[in-house]
Amino acid sequence: MDTPTPPAAGAAPVLVERAGRVGLVTLNRPKALNALDDALMDALGAALLAFDADEGIGAIVIAGGPKAFAAGADIAAMVDWTIADVERDRFITRNWETIRRVRKPVLAAVSGWAMGGGCELALACDIVVAGRSARFGLPEIRLAMLPGAGGTQRLPRAIGKAKAMDMCLSGRVLDADEADRYGLVSRVVDDDRLLEETLALATAIAGYSLPALRAIKESVDRAYESTLAEGVLFERRQLYARFASEDAHEGMRAFLDKRTPSFGHR
């Protein structure tokens, strides 16, 4: 696997690279601690959709920098906005929610600050790998604002109402180990191995059958948005559909033959 080189400061708000069947999108506003402005979110959304449409990509990684995954929304850009401005421009809705349209697994590699919108971006990913320096918080209350990019909705689903209320109402910041204990992150690794470990995990995931990965992602997401009975019905239909998949029959035959399956992603 070719490990991409760290980004340098430049005009491009995100850097896009490939590592085998993994697409890597690196947030690239280091001087602003990767504050999430419109240009960055537009570029991130475009990169995610391009990788999602690319048949040679099976999983996507979003990474930040060593000091910050993303320090939050760009407050300097927002300070003078009015309600008419945000409604007219469909703030958040227009570009922050593009990630919801991505059907392939999306992993976040988080080190340093993941605050406000940065924390919400991580929450929108399917798997969060945190370096030990990672810090997660939703401090919008300090600005008389609220987490508006899904934070008040995804955080309770991830860590429960009590912890989510604490973070949202007090601005409490979690370190990596706390975030791991509470269920906000998937795993914690040393900072100097964060990108390597996340790319290795993404590579392993991307090696599986893409239709099966999509089915699993859709099924788990459905668990958050439906009753148990409806979710189980959706899961069962997805399971039955696997029997129409060439990959599923290849996977089962390979298991019986004690060999590595060769998936065609069909």
Image (spheres, helix red, strand yellow):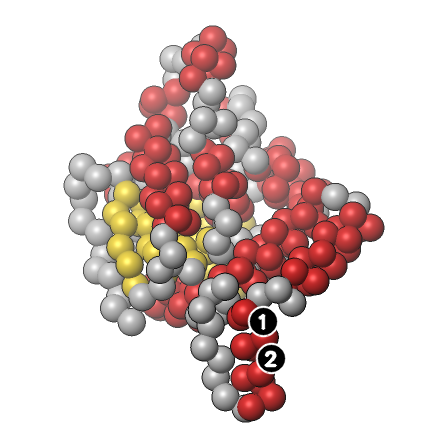
Dot 2 alpha-carbon crowd within 10 angstroms: few under 14, some 14 to 19, many 20 or more = few
Q: Which amino acid does label 2 sit on?
A: Met
Outermost residue toward the bottom in this view: 258
- Cβ atoms at labels 1 and 2 below 8 Å apart: yes
Q: Is residue 66 above or below residue 34?
A: below
Distance CA(mark 1)–CA(mark 2): 6 Å
- Asked which secondary structure carries label 2, the reply is helix
x 50%, y 49%: residue: 103
Residue situated in front as seen by the camera: 265 or 177: 265
Q: Is residue 11 something one can see in this rendering?
A: yes
Q: Which residue lies furthest to the right in this view?
A: 229
Q: From this viewpoint, is residue 63 visible? A: no
Rendered residue at 39%/43% (across/down): 49
Tell me where residue 235 sits by quadrant.
bottom right
Residue flagged by tag 1: what amino acid is it? Ala
Residue 131 location in percent, x, y? Answer: 42, 60
Residue labelled with disc 1: 248
Q: How crowded is mark 1: few (under 14 residues within 10 Å), some or many (20 or more)?
A: many
- In this rendering, the answer to whether 249 lies above or below 256 is above
The residue singled out by tag 2 in the image is 252
Q: Where is residue 261 drawn, in percent x and y?
A: 49, 80
Q: Where is residue 170 in the image (x, y as percent from the top left)?
A: 60, 35
Nearer the observer, 11 or 56: 56
Is residue 155 or residue 134 the one in the foreground? 155
